[in-house]
Amino acid sequence: MRSETDLTVVVIAHNDARRLPRAVRSVLAQSLARVEVVIVDDGSTDSTPQVAASMAAADPDRVRAYLLRENSGGCGAPRNFGLQVARGRYVMFLDSDDTLPPHACDILRAAAEESGADLVAGRCVRVLPGREKDWCPWLYQEPGVFNGLLEQPDLLHDTLATNKCYRRDFLDRAKLRFAERLHYEDLLFSAQAYLAADRIAVVPDRVYNWLVEPRTGRPSISNRRAEPRNFADRLEVHRRIDAALRAHGAAELACRKDAKFIDHDLLLYLRELRSRTPAHRELFTDLARPYLAEMDDEGFLAAGRIPAIAALMIREGDVEAAMAAVDLEPRSGVPVLSIEPAERDGRVYWSDAHIGTELGHAVLDVTDLGLRTLPPEALHLGGSVTTMRQEGDYLRVTGTVVNPLGRIGPDAELSATLEFRDRRRPSRVFGVEVAVWRRERDGRITWEAVLAPSRSIRPVGLVDQTWAMGLRLRAGDTAHTVRLASQGTAHCGLAVPIRPRLTRALGDHLEPFIAGNGELALRIVARRWPARTVLSGLRLAARTGPVRAIRDRRARRRRSRAGNDGRTSSSGPARPSDGAVGGPREPRTAHRTSTKM
């Protein structure tokens, strides 16, 4: 009976037989006694249904298992089913690849009882390989009770549904259910729950372990950002959140929510835009522009400086200027200035093509960034490869380098080296001297290299599969690092022969591609026998064989230690400053079963 159960944890799973038992065990080990587990299998095709059934049979008083015959394609349908059959007075949600710390249920239920809150949120910790990172740490520095979202609007940054405990009668009274057949249902559900709750409590204790593993196959829903539907669904979710804000008389929160969209949601896609095809960029821009046009100017002004510039450039249809803005705020490494800003009346603007409006004039003014005076080691330059052509055994590569704000003087003597850097071990570099000059018609710095890849680039083979291309430009006594990019048209279909030091069985050609950070790179590929057989087999072994087994054992030990964490206080960093993303950024290599972000 529902009255006999304090709390129900709904565990959803799809093709996750390996990790499901760990998640369920973390619930059964809770210090709160009257907790039940409802497992909902979302149409798995592996042994997950049998694993779930065996756990239910082993502990029928505390575990129930249900199977949805057809996969719903998301998290909404299985969670809604779990809500339908839940018996507890309180409800939580757990993904099959995550765990709950031992006291999570007790902490959250006790906070709800003491405060009378409709929902209680606690600290989620992302457990990554070799490190941990708090999610939205500034929200969970200390306990708090708020009479609705208007008293703590920053909660909109925490879009997770899983680090929270809900009163079951509150969900029923507010008719709250997850959207189905729509990705990013967590974002919508969380916003609707915040808006509907009369009282919200937060606790600084660790209540959820978000376990991030290296990608092991098809990426999760939230990591399929290359698919147009992924971004279209995110936009639809945000439009529904906008409608919910209006319906609850909380339209004044739209500015904060729009700023979060610019700082976090949109930025996730913009960071990967250089690695997409021109056709994908065009489709992405066509989807984003109408939604950005609906935003009030206050949302742009409240967002971080660089994300706001990128968003405004997308709204204006200037994709190159948007990608260049993202280059200036990378996830890691040195910022890259890949555009030539304009000077007007003693001020510096990101682009002079869009400063005719009051918003453009305010957002695009980057004078205070000091782009002219930053030293070369603090600001790399951007460049493009315009031609990459094979000529017999040789490869001819030409390109250009931007010279923003005259950082390279007109009389400086120029020389350059084209570098190929091991992307896993940056200290390993091969270099080729290039010819460099200034074009007479516009002064643009241009360069050309001719090399024999089989002699100039000698990778070992298996351990150094990808090589970044970059330019080391010397202007007099000053050296500049140039990040090279390409628009995808200069090297399509190109593959040049190479000879790895170990054996050609580890690969026989180098193929250009655009890496996730936007830089042009080369990767070892197998075009001929025996490399086509050997290389694919070695890569499979690295994913599924002894190498993978060792990595998995180490990861399990780390996660086991994380699962044993009890009542711990938040010690995360303070809230990010202007321009920082509202929550921790989603790693591209994470394999998830849900859409949490």
Image (spheres, rainbow, N blue to C red):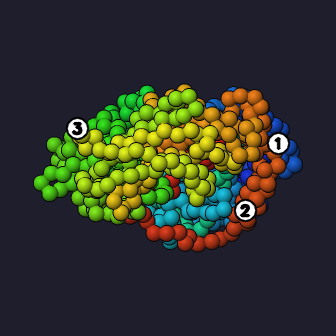
Circle 2 is placed at which residue position? 558
Question: Does 111 sit left or right of 372 as displayed?
Answer: right
Residue 237 or residue 230, whichever sits in front: 230
**Of tags 3 and 1, which is closer to the observer?**
3
Q: Amino acid at mark 2?
A: Arg
Question: Does 448 sit left or right of 360 as displayed?
Answer: right
Query: Residue 284 appears in which quarter of the rendering?
Result: top left
**Of tags 3 and 2, which is closer to the observer?**
3
Q: Mark 3: few, some, or many residues within 10 Å (few <14, many ≥20)?
A: few
Give the residue displayed 60% in from the left and 37% down from the top. 510
N-term-proximal mark, 3 vs 2 = 3
Residue 455 or residue 64, whichever sits in front: 455
Image position, residue 423 (x, y; %): 58, 51
Give the residue displayed 73% in from the left and 65% down from the top. 561
N-term-proximal mark, 3 vs 1 = 1
Do the residues under discs 2 and 1 have CB atoms within 8 angstroms?
Answer: no
In the depicted structure, whether residue 289 falls above or below residue 36: above
Q: Mark 2: few, some, or many residues within 10 Å (few <14, many ≥20)?
A: some
Give the residue displayed 44% in from the left and 53% down from the top. 472
Q: Amino acid at mark 1?
A: Val
- What numbered label is drawn on residue 51? 1
Please, what secondary structure does the residue beneath circle 2 have?
Answer: helix
**Of tags 2 and 1, which is closer to the observer?**
2
Question: Does 223 sit left or right of 42 as displayed?
Answer: left
Give the residue displayed 67% in from the left and 51% down from the top. 213
Q: Is residue 577 at all visible to an observer of this figure?
A: yes
Question: Does 289 sit left or right of 271 as displayed?
Answer: left
Circle 3 is placed at which residue position? 441
